[in-house]
């Protein structure tokens, strides 16, 4: 734990503490003063004091708090980095969206690289950020009225050990399916007047293909009238629930993109994480989907339980061989609620770093470019998730959501609608309950709350 004379800095400083194994057991205190035209930070670690001074011009309370957090975190990061003899790939940056900070610096007429270097970000990740921004060119747009629609289907065949989402095996939740589909239809219909300039529709999970064909058709039939002419994605999910009938339904209703969530091409790893399919079934799902002409995304996870560097590199190579237009490389995130968090504290940083480095090299060589990246708390090795794309296939929805550059109207359990007020520089949210029965009891109230949020001038 750490104490500070500035109470609002507590959560920010704890984000830094959690980056270092064992740091939560240290005796730490922090003090910050703004004096002599800059921020003076003092960190006391096991009785040893370190002082840092950063000159800064402050205009207004918001700017003060922003810079206060930045330099307090940097001071603590440098203290702990020196104590452990360890540099982290993103340095003292703890935010979820590095590119958003980079865009803000550019909008202010500054080179984001200077700030990133000051915060201890590696040169490799500075280059990754620049490449990602270039990959978003022609898609990234901050324009009032832009909007995406998200439809939540939180149902899965089984629960993976690393998963922290609300999903449960569909056998345990099927009793709610008729009422859930009716609630979704009402929510989608009520969302129509709220939609401004629609850029994409995304049906996510969970595993949407866990639904029976007629159930999936109800959802797509409700969404299709809105999705004409825009990117329309279904996160089909796990290959053990793929059928030609479900793919044909997607095609009939105008779906343009699907996601095949392989996670790994190692049968040993798939069994260890609770998947009930093989790597060969993943390949079969690709073969089944290809004749329908969808743009395909394939997900991989670096750092899955017990997976070796060689196994992960094999998975990257196999994904490339199958040729999806997008490949997303996630770093394992050990959130509260995931079974794997009970078994695994931290992964070996060196092996995980080698996994990430290999994926970047192999995907670049294969013609993929990064086009979105984001980070999460409790992410193994303090790394990141990166979406890679072949030229011309970047996902509008992923860019909009990761950069929070457009409104997001989200329906279903555990869905969070966001009103992005660009002119005010803030975001307002309306969240749905995670629990399906609670969501069903509050559907009408959620419809009213969402309408009120998007009716604001």
Image: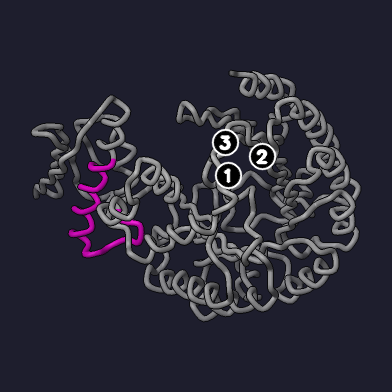
> Is label 2 or label 3 in front?
3
- Per the image, the residue denoted by label 2 is 148
State how far apart marks 1 and 2 are (Cα). 8 Å
Name the side, left or right, on which 185 lies relative to 7: right
> Is label 1 or label 3 in front?
3
Residue in the picture at 82% in, 50% down = 211
Q: Secondary structure at mark 1?
A: helix
Q: Is residue 77 shown in magenta?
A: yes
Name the side, left or right, on which 237 lies relative to 18: right
From the top left corner, tell me how far across and down residue 104 is, in percent: 40, 42
Residue in the picture at 15% in, 32% down = 34
Q: Residues within 10 Å of mark 1 (few under 14, many from 20)?
A: some
Q: Secondary structure at mark 2?
A: strand
Contact (Cβ within 8 Å) of mark 1 with mark 2: yes
The mark that comes first in sequence, 2 or 3, is 3
The mark that comes first in sequence, 1 or 3, is 3
Q: Residues within 10 Å of mark 3 (few under 14, many from 20)?
A: some
Locate the C terminus by quadrant: top right
Using the rendered image of the protein, determine whether residue 20 is visible from the camera's viewpoint.
no
| Foreground pick, 19 / 254 | 254
| Foreground pick, 26 / 331 | 331
Location of residue 301 by image quarter: bottom right
| Foreground pick, 396 / 273 | 396
From the top left corner, tell me how far across and down residue 317 is, in percent: 60, 78
């Amino acid at each position: 734990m750490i104490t500070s004379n500035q109470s609002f800095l507590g959560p920010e400083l704890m984000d830094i503490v959690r980056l270092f194994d064992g740091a939560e057991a240290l005796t730490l205190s922090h003090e910050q003063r703004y004096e002599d035209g800059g921020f003076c930070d003092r960190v006391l670690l096991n009785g040893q004091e370190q002082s840092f001074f950063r000159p800064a011009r402050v205009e207004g309370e918001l700017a003060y708090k922003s810079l206060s957090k930045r330099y307090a975190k940097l001071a603590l990061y440098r203290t702990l980095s020196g104590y452990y003899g360890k540099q982290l790939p993103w340095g003292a940056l703890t935010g979820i969206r590095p590119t958003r900070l980079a865009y803000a610096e550019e909008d202010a007429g500054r080179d984001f690289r200077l700030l990133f270097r000051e915060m201890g970000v590696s040169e490799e990740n500075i280059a990754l950020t620049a490449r990602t921004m270039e990959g978003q060119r022609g898609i990234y747009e901050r324009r009032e009225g832009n909007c995406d629609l998200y439809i939540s289907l939180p149902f899965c065949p089984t629960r993976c050990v690393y998963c922290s989402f609300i999903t449960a095996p569909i056998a345990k939740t099927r009793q709610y399916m008729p009422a859930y589909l009716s609630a979704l239809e009402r929510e989608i219909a009520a969302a129509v007047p709220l939609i401004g300039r629609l850029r994409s529709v995304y049906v996510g999970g969970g595993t949407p293909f866990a639904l029976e064909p007629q159930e999936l058709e109800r959802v797509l039939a409700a969404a299709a009238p809105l999705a004409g002419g825009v990117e329309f994605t279904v996160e089909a999910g796990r290959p053990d629930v793929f059928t030609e009938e479900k793919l044909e339904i997607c095609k009939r209703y105008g779906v343009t993109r699907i996601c095949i969530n392989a996670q790994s091409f190692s049968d040993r790893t798939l069994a260890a994480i609770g998947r009930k399919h093989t790597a060969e079934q993943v390949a079969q799902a690709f073969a089944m989907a290809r004749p329908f002409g969808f743009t395909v995304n394939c997900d991989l996870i670096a750092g899955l339980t017990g997976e070796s560097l060689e196994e992960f590199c094999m998975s990257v190579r196999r994904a490339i061989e199958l040729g999806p237009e997008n490949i997303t490389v996630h770093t394992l995130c050990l959130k509260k609620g995931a079974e794997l968090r009970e078994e695994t504290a931290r992964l070996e940083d060196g092996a995980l770093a080698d996994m990430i480095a290999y994926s970047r090299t192999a995907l670049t060589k294969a013609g993929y470019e990064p086009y979105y990246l984001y980070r999460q708390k409790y992410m193994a090795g303090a790394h990141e998730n990166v979406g890679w794309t072949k030229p011309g296939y970047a996902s509008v929805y992923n860019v909009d959501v990761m950069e929070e550059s457009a409104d997001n109207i989200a329906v279903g359990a555990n869905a969070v609608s966001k009103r992005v007020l660009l002119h005010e520089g803030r975001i307002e949210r309306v969240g749905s309950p995670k629990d399906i029965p609670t969501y069903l009891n509050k559907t009408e109230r959620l419809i009213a709350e969402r309408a009120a949020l998007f009716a604001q001038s």
